Amino acid sequence: MEQVLIKNTKIVNEGEIFEGDILIEDGIIKEIASSISAKSQEVQVFDAEEKYLFPGVIDDQVHFREPGLTHKANIASESRAAVAGGITSYIEMPNTNPQTTTIEELDKKFAIAEATSAANYSFMFGGTNDNLQEILKVDSTQVAGLKLFLGSSTGNMLVDDPEILERIFSSTDLLISVHCEDEGTIRENLANFKERFGDDIPIQYHPIIRSEQACYLSSSKAIELAKKTGARLHIFHLSTGKETELFTNKIPLEEKKITSEVCIHHLWFTDKDYEEKGTLIKWNPAVKTQADKDQLWKALLDDRIDVIATDHAPHTLEEKSNVYTKAPSGGPLVQHALVAMLEAYHQGKISLEKIAEKMCHNPAKLFQIEKRGFIKEGYYADLVLVDLNHPWTVSKDNLFYHCGWSPFEGNTFKSRISHTFVNGTLVYKNFKFYDVKAAKRLTFNR
């Protein structure tokens, strides 16, 4: 029996912050109390020294690029970066090479993660115009959900046949997560700008090409279809203020059939940052205006938006340095997501309790993840110690991404992730990793 005792910490959990100790036994939280004494010398004791203890962050949308795109990233490298950022569980997307659109390819990814992942893991199964029979084979207790690209897909993953889309929505009990951008609108906008500029379109036109209209049109159609069919719908990475009007805060999250997510980059950057950052902050959907950012924050805080995620999607610097039409969209974020939100706490934008709700509790509720996302007796001990007053500056020397760059380079954060525990095992401490195998496959209470 392995026991770990974390003492003298400020626990952030379920809308409260309270001082206490936590005893972990064989990876499970055994006891939470104001004071716990080690009952033997074999108990591993950590003095938190008044640091804040969060549940491990659950990131519901990452692209770790394995298999097939491992020059950009892989499950081993990006999961290490994730635990360095306080993310102890992740859900990875299906647009790899080959794509995760068959049970065979899904099983291969689970095998890779079992062998190499530093954080707990699950995967989205990918939908296409022609794989409904494979979708129906997926065990909803073992897989996070179904991912549909209703815009900006790779390979053949754009689901653009309305009849097939409705058939998928009507046929599966999987949670359906969608990327919503209307391809017709984007193609028309892109053609107009290519006529003016050729391939070297100035990056500041990106949010005009991938416009508010494109996002809203696609999101509203997906919601209409979910209401018609009764499907359980989760809309990824909202980027416009207008889209926030589509969601409600009138009912508890557990009762919502239609939920939404916002990503770190849409809460942090605006279109004014393209001048400095260029294609490094080229994402789909695009980073948009200050007004959009303000409305996203408002909807996040009033609970119309349910989850904060990263959409971590690394590319090499060489790839990102191409002209507009050839520079891929996406960037690395898992290592800096929690500290970015803690920076927003320091700025008075959000409370620590709300950060835990949106990054830890709500993903667990929304995806019905078993025994994670909370600091509770009987739950897995996925825990993150945070020092709120230990400034550090992001540089290439302290990055763990395989791609070797970050849109936050040069930024000084006030807070630091000091310790990350995965299933009760210390896997990371102050920029140092421990070579232990602690991660587990996520399971779902459905």
Image: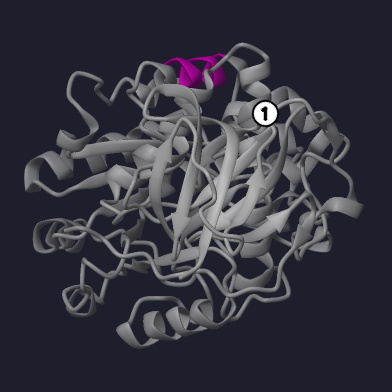
Tell me the crowding category of disc 1: few under 14, some 14 to 19, or many 20 or more residues within 10 angstroms, Cα based. some
Residue 312 appears in the rendering:
yes
Looking at the rendering, which quadrant does residue 132 occupy?
A: bottom left
Judge by depth and name the residue closer to the eye, 157 or 432.
432
Q: Residue 126 at what x, y percent from top left? A: 35, 68
Q: Going by the image, does 377 lie left or right of 368?
A: right
Q: Is residue 159 above or below residue 57?
A: below
Q: Is residue 315 above or below residue 272?
A: below
267 sits to left or right of 99: right
> Residue visible at 55% across and 61% down?
63
The amino acid pointed to by label 1 is: Phe
Residue at 14% of width from left, 60% of height from top? Answer: 173
Q: Quadrant of residue 83?
A: bottom right
Which residue is tagged 1?
269
As helix, strand or loop, the secondary structure at mark 1 comes to: loop
Q: Residue at x 81, y 37 (%)?
A: 277
Judge whether residue 311 can be spotted in this image: no
Question: Going by the picture, which residue comes out furthest to the top?
Answer: 348
Total number of numbered labels?
1
Question: x, y percentage for residue 381?
Answer: 46, 53
Instruction: Give the magenta range.
Output: 291-298
Within the magenta stretch, is there residue 292?
yes
Split into 4 quadrants, where in the image is the C terminus?
bottom left
Which quarter of the picture shows residue 407?
A: top right
Q: Assign the magenta stretch its main secondary structure.
A: helix
Q: Is 139 positioned to the left or the right of 207 in the image?
A: left
The residue lying at 83 percent from left, 54 percent from top is: 321
Residue 444 in percent (x, y) is at 26, 60
**Outermost front residue:** 40
Residue 136: x percent and y percent? 16, 74
Relative side of 133 to 39, left or right: left
Check if residue 286 falls in the magenta segment. Answer: no
